[in-house]
Image (cartoon, rainbow, N blue to C red):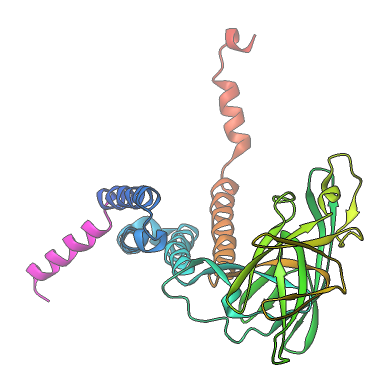
Amino acid sequence: MDEKHLQLMTQLVSSLASLKLTFAAISLLLLAVVAANLLGWPYAEAIAAPVLLLTVNLIFAILHQPAFKRDSSLLLFHIALAMLLPVALYGSLAGFQGRFELPEGATFAPGQLVVTKQGPLHPYSLDELSLSLQAMEATYVPGKRAQRLRARVWLDDEQWVVAEHLPLVWRGYRINVSKNIGFSALLQFTDGAGQTLTHGVNFPWLAANELRQANEVALLGEPFWLKLEGVESMLESNMDAVDFVPPAAAFLVLRQGERRLELRPGQEIAINGGRLRYLGLGSWQGFEIIYDPAKPFLLAIGVILCAAMGWYFYRRFSRYDWAASTATNRSSQSPTDAS
């Protein structure tokens, strides 16, 4: 490489390591964050270019600045910092968040999943998740707050317990219970040909919808409304802590046009050319599912950053002669100052 090309290369490295580029990249990152929030752009994609620019700037600063070569703790700190940005970005691009509801006795189906966040690089799907809810437990305390949530589930023919701080891990996904719980009515419909269909109807989350416990159901293409009555007393403001179980006084109100009927467990009616039987009232549990591949790496990088900074300050201040400094300060004081 001749002197001209070497000079150009040096200038390029110096430019990529400059503070001006750092400030420009940080400004672009701030603008990308603001634009993502105001315009609804995907957050990870919006900040990808500024984050990569900052990472390149930091890498060339490590290579260019002689201070990093003299101090291994500073070098380690900035290498970890350079890794932090792209790892966090990858976690956002490949991450996933969603939620679903499962009635007792039901098995998860992909159609139940509500995706709240999914990066474009997310590598898996939940089609093979074989999760069923055996039973759930919860306690309501004054203030309409659900506590001590526990769900007994089956996953791949093994029984597990999922609690508020005890998630279930499946292929990198963390499945946890949410505060969303409610009641679910189990109905059995037999058509004119004798074919039987069992259908579960989930009523809305009880704590936020105690006066709106209703849902629409369609049988043979004809809709009707079901309303759950008799559960409002569970959330009275002066109540003591109560277990989340269907009240004995609860019953269903069915409306179809001008028709209104009350149903209790075991009762059946003629409807839509067949027979509808109310089997009983159970519960459903809400679940949150998160996939964050960057989390363990971010934790490791955080430990490295803290260790490198601790090492740097220890080496810096352990060489400092505190006794000599104190003596010098005392001797420099005037008699007036000392008094």
Residue 144 drawn at (x, y percent) = 78, 47
Was residue 2 drawn as part of the magenta stretch in this picture?
yes
Residue 306 image-quadrant placement: bottom right
Residue placed at 90% from the left, 53% from the top? 242
Between 86 and 204, which is closer to the camera in this rendering?
204
Residue 238 drawn at (x, y percent) = 88, 39
Residue placed at 47% from the left, 72% from the top? 94
Q: Which residues are magenta?
A: 1-18
Residue 246 image-quadrant placement: bottom right
Residue 277 image-quadrant placement: bottom right
Residue 62 visible in the current orientation: no
Residue placed at 79% from the left, 54% from the top? 146
Between 233 and 40, which is closer to the camera in this rendering?
233
Residue 108 drawn at (x, y percent) = 66, 79
Q: In screen coordinates, is 36 left or right of 259?
A: left
- Most extreme residue toward the front, as rendered? 258
Residue 223 drawn at (x, y percent) = 61, 69
